[in-house]
Image: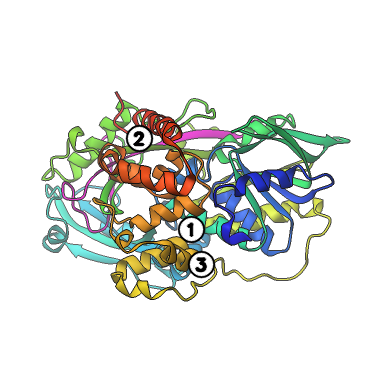
Amino acid sequence: MWQTAGAPGEREKRLNELKSAGKHWDVIIAGGGITGAGIAREAARRGLNVLLLERQDFAWGTSSRSSKMVHGGLRYIAQGDIKTTMHSVHERERLMTELPGLVDRMGYMMAHYKGGFPGPFVFNTLLRVYDFFAGKRYRQFFRKDDFSYLSPLINEENLIGGTQFADAVTDDSRLVMRVLREAQKDGATVINYVGVKKLIKTDGRVTGAMVEDVISGEQISVNADVVINATGAWADELRGQMNAEKKIRPARGSHVVVPFWRLPVAQSFTVLHPDDKRPIFIFPWEGRTVIGTTDIDNKGIDNTEASMTRAELDYLLRVAQYQFPGADIEEKDIISSWAGVRPLVSSGALNPSKEKRDHSVWDDAGLVSVSGGKLTTFRLIALDVLQAARKYIRKYPDGEFSAQLFTPVADVPETTAELPSYSDKRLRGHYGMDMAALLDKASADELDLVPGCRTLWAEVRWSAAAESVEHLDDLMLRRTRLGLLLEGGGEKVMERIRNICQQELGWNDERWNTELQRYRAIWKAHYSIPA
């Protein structure tokens, strides 16, 4: 049953399914980020036999380390890419409607200074187009005194006012899990820590893959009509097996997290960095304030986590100090950091910020690859990929399918009446169809918040019990975001985390100590302040 697909022991059952003699899949998807999840969801709802494999954890790569924004891409209007903006705005509005509590409207502010670009007139002209696509007016201009009231710590030197508009904010890895759950509901098989090792070809055409269980090292041969390569920044690895030309330009984007009380912002501020005029966001997220992102070439990519450099740290601190001098943010204020690698499709642009953000699809004789694109438009990307893969799938159904992505939340236990409205909304958005089971499993004291963030202890238990957690970092960095939101990666709550993991995952003391050491090493190397 899909309801228990992420419970301990279920992974082994799915691996045994892969070994079944004569088992044939319509579609194998390599990659468990938002793009792969979206493809699995659209393929499964069409009745296809779908297998999604992720060689790390779900959302491990770019999809847990984005800027957490579901946005229309305002700057694409300025670049003349009207189509990408229009599609993105429409998808943003759809996601806000379907997923309140996970994809929520957030106000954005742009300060205007004397002699600065863009000025109020130019910027509000762009916003007219933006709001036209949304079918709503979000834009509003504030004169200096009113704008300073809304942002009392802001740099007021030469300030003439500011403009407010709207986009949306999310928890990117939770969005991936919601989409994967919809795919599972419709029959997709999804497994983490299993990677596509080698493509299987018949007469030059891809007809399956040799896959590897990363945990045991066992390799299994799997047959399919088509293999879809949704590995994003790593897409050239599988395409290389088809002797295809490299297309991906990995670009790193880094962020830092500081306490909200140190830099209190009620909405996102778009700031042009004083050094290079790149737009940087300073925004509220999960009760903290985030500053990001950088945009630099990553100098290659491998199967390890990305990390922020000292130069990036200094760059982000500089923009915070420039825009909010009254806050006086320093390195000692930083709680955590994260760095993700964007899968830009290379056009030879001198600067990665100048590369296009739209997605590209390639067909290499039965290996259909996709890379680039935006978190916001994952549904449209999935439809383009399936259209390209369709000619290989023997039983591809005809007909129209609903654009609605998510199943409405069913009735929940009476305990939900005890929750404050913001927690009720959060659980509905973050867990959807699983909300009732999550609350049913929780004890009374697990409806309390984990100290220092907006996560309930009930969420931690549910994720350990039902969401394919194989390692402690899966739980702390992706199913929940405790490793990003709590000082020291959550060391102060680790004893209670230990109790939950031992109860739900069956980890003995030796396994717990191994997992804790692994997590601490990952957090120190990739999520703390760089040495």
**Residue 139 in view here:** yes
Q: Which mark is residue 527?
A: 2
Q: Determine whether the residue tagged by mark 2 lies in a helix, strand or loop.
A: loop
Closer to the camera: disc 1 or disc 3?
Answer: 3
Per the image, is 270 magenta? yes
Question: Which stretch is magenta?
Answer: 246-275
Q: Position of residue 92 (x, y in %)?
A: 46, 63
In screen coordinates, is 121 left or right of 427?
A: left
**Residue 81 in view here:** no
Q: Determine whether the residue tagged by mark 1 lies in a helix, strand or loop.
A: helix
Closer to the camera: disc 2 or disc 3?
Answer: 3
Q: Determine whether the residue tagged by mark 3 lies in a helix, strand or loop.
A: helix
Separation of marks 1 and 3 at Cα, in angstroms: 31 Å
Q: For the residue marked with disc 3, what is the amino acid?
A: Met
Closer to the camera: disc 2 or disc 1?
Answer: 2
**Above or below, comparing residue 428 to residue 248 in the picture:** below
What color scheme is it? Answer: rainbow
Disc on the earlier residue, 1 or 3: 1
Q: Characterize the local packing of mark 2: few (<14), some (14-19) or many (20 or more) Cα atoms within 10 angstroms.
A: many
Q: Which mark is residue 85?
A: 1
